[in-house]
Amino acid sequence: MIHGERKTAAPIRWAMVGGGRGSQIGYIHRSAALRDRHFELVAGAFDLDPERGRAFGAELGLEAGRCYPDHATMFAEEAARPDGIRAVSVATPNNTHYAITKAALEHGLHVVCEKPLCFTTAEALELADLARARGRIVGVTYGYAGHQLIEQASAMVARGDLGEIRLVNLQFAHGFHSEAVELENPATRWRVDPRFAGPSYVLGDVGTHPFYISEVILPHLKVKRLLCARQSFVRSRAPLEDNAVTLMEYDNGAFGTVWSSAVNAGSMHGQKVRITGAKASLEWWDERPNQLSFEVQGEPARILERGMPYLHPEALADDRIGGGHPEGLFEAWSNLYDRFAIAMEASDRGDTARLAALRYPDIAAGVEGVRWVENCVRSADRGGVWVDYE
């Protein structure tokens, strides 16, 4: 990775739905997808306002005729072109993800979708079945999982460095919405409106990120039951929560907690993952993504640095600029888009062995994120009671 060699035969013709002018997440998608030359942006339906979308597409250097008024028109017209798109990224509000992803799969396209994939587990499973039937890849942008030290943590757990896993402490608790910022900020307004955001705010918006990271590090652990309590401290956000605490029991007897919050006043980001075993603990904090804490009982604490030769090969494969130089969000997202492209190409040529060996947030991760939120909401809405994980 560090020398930037292409890992696919040719760039994948790619489009975006949403992510137009002023969209921070749209810029992140494009920066990540285009970085390693795996994708070529050739079309888009960037905005609900067709003229504004066309103007933005022109700024990106796209042909005017391939800047479409909506996703349905784009999918139909691109399907009729010999050089039509092969993949699309969906960077639109939550309530549109299911319909756009389904339409893309029905047109034979690979998809990269913002989370949540949809609002219900039933919808998510329908999309998974459709992706499987069409032989298409669906990637979900749990971008923080692209940090190379997440791979290091996974390898250390698999090797037994921590011993039997006992505790899983997860949090993503920032403070930027500790007041009703949505009154002035349209980008936040839809996130706290159930018509657009779905059945939750912070559980789906931030809580699913560390939950997915824990799945990467601990693939052998499965949630058996959970209890969730959620609050709307900014009252106008009810029935959606801006703070939630989830307790989880795993099938091996381990115990987990997830703190999801947008009202942790003073916190910049507050995403931390701590895994505790019988012998040692690991901790990763996304504000210091280049370090992984490794604490063995009875020994001095150690800090493992990104890009160093003592890391596992799986971690070093994601290295981009060598040890000592700080990396961050764009590198993590680029690593995910790198894997998305490899998966899409492998799927197109029927390389099931390559697909089986590749770890990325796929349709199953999207399904599990929706399932986790659904179970949390079910528990919270029953008064914060234990529920079996369904």
Image (cartoon, rainbow, N blue to C red):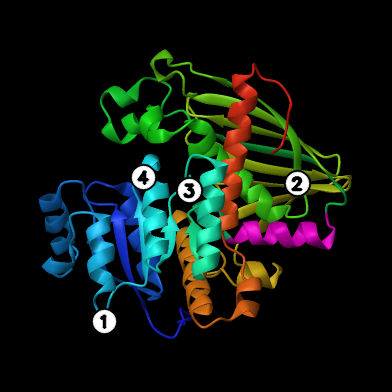
Q: Amino acid at mark 2?
A: Lys
Q: Which residue range is magenta in the image?
A: 148-161
Q: Quadrant of residue 376?
A: top right
Residue tagged 3: 117
Tell me which numbered mark, 1 or 4, is placed earlier along the sequence: 1
In contact (CB < 8 Å): disc 3 and disc 4? no
Judge from the rendering whether residue 237 lies leftward or rightward of residue 259; answer left or right: left
Circle 1 or circle 2, nearest the eye: 1
What residue would you read off at disc 2? 222
- Which residue: 38% across, 61% down? 104
* Rendered residue at 61%/47% (across/down): 368
Camera-side residue of 51 and 214: 51
What's the distance in space between the residues labelled 1 and 2, CA to CA?
A: 45 Å
CA gap, disc 3 to disc 1?
29 Å
Residue found 48% across the figure and 48% down from its top: 117
- Residue 305 seen anywhere in this rendered image of the structure: no
